[in-house]
Image: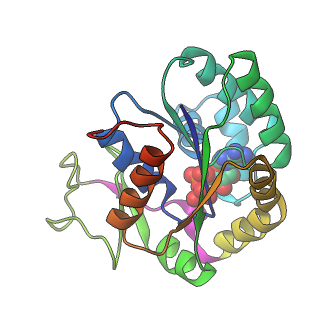
């Protein structure tokens, strides 16, 4: 099963990927943003080149992204996969269909995380993550249960993403409108798009996604 989580920054795609991973066995979560941040952290030459682009909120080129995804897909053809943050341009969506076609696969469902831009700004500008495990928190809405200790791994070091500042977020939202929104029409025309009210609570969104997957016969009851 191939699922795409589509939506602006801060719409909850990462959170929902983690939640679904807890219930659907062996589900692979592919976040192109996480992969790129790992590349930067590895201090590779490629990571070095990507760093300034990402911190400025700009897109990485389609070639690099498609190559990254292609490698992952080849290793996981038999697995259930969520793509979070990919495809993000029409060219990526078309290249993705070609890659999937080679493996006799297709995009089964695209969840469109629909959310007001004001909510996005509020969510993104207050968020930070655990350096140990990547768990995401928010200064106002989602603090760890014990102050400054990660709920998931007990880590005590946290970091804010440079691209979560208000200025950079504005750039990201503008690029989202211009480059990414056409992808929504592409999947709408294929009849695989499912809208989610992403302003609902995380639990409600998870419940919606699971129900939709169940109704589409993509997961079984109990998963
Ligand atoms: P968000 O969805 O909150 O914008 P991500 O963690 O998914 O954040 O991505 C962070 C950054 O990584 C993006 O702003 C962009 O620079 C780069 N990136 C991630 N995925 C893609 C993609 N599919 N195409 C181009 N650039 C990407």
* Colouring: rainbow
Residue 171 lies in the magenta-colored region: no
Residue drawn at 64 percent across, 36 percent down: 47
Does 12 sit left or right of 193 as displayed?
left
Residue drawn at 76 percent across, 51 percent down: 59
Image coordinates for residue 44, horizontal then vertical, percent: 62, 28
Note whether 156 is above or below 99 in the view shown.
below
Note whether 167 is above or below 154 in the view shown.
below
Does 185 sit left or right of 111 as displayed?
right
Give whichever of 171, 91 is nearer the camera: 91
Residue 45 in view (yes/no): no
Give whichever of 42, 12 is nearer the camera: 12
Q: Dividing the picture into quarters, in which one does residue 188 lie?
A: bottom right
Does 215 sit left or right of 202 as displayed?
right
Residue 42 in view (yes/no): yes
Residue drawn at 30 percent across, 70 percent down: 142
Q: Dividing the picture into quarters, in which one does residue 200 lie?
A: bottom left
Residue 159 lies in the magenta-colored region: yes
> Residue lying farthest left?
146
Q: Which residues are magenta?
A: 157-166
Q: Dividing the picture into quarters, in which one does residue 149 lie?
A: bottom left
Residue drawn at 30 percent across, 41 percent down: 22
Looking at the rendered image, the quarter that the C terminus falls into is top left
Image coordinates for residue 120, horizontal then vertical, percent: 56, 75
Image coordinates for residue 176, horizontal then vertical, percent: 74, 63
Note whether 200 is above or below 187 in the view shown.
below
Give whichever of 47, 172 is nearer the camera: 172
> Residue lying farthest bottom?
118
């Amino acid at each position: 099963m191939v699922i795409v989580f589509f939506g602006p920054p801060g719409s909850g795609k990462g959170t929902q990927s983690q939640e679904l991973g807890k219930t659907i066995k062996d589900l692979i979560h592919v976040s192109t943003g996480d992969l790129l941040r790992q590349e930067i952290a590895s201090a590779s030459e490629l990571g070095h080149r990507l760093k300034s682009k990402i911190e400025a909120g700009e897109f990485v080129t389609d070639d690099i992204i498609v190559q990254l995804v292609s490698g992952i897909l080849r290793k996981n053809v038999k697995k259930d996969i969520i793509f979070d943050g990919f495809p993000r341009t029409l060219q990526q969506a078309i290249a993705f269909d070609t890659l999937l076609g080679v493996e006799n696969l297709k995009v089964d469902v695209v969840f469109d995380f629909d959310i007001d831009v004001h909510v996005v700004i509020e969510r993104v500008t207050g968020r930070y993550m655990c350096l140990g495990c990547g768990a995401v928190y928010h200064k106002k809405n989602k603090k760890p249960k014990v102050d400054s200790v990660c709920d998931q791994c007990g880590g005590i070091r946290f970091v804010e993403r440079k691209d979560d500042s208000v200025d950079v977020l504005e750039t990201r939202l503008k690029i989202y409108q211009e480059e990414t929104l056409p992808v929504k029409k592409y999947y709408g025309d294929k009849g695989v798009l499912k809208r989610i009210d992403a302003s609902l609570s995380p639990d409600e969104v998870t419940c919606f996604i699971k129900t939709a997957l169940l109704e589409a016969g993509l997961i079984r009851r109990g998963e």
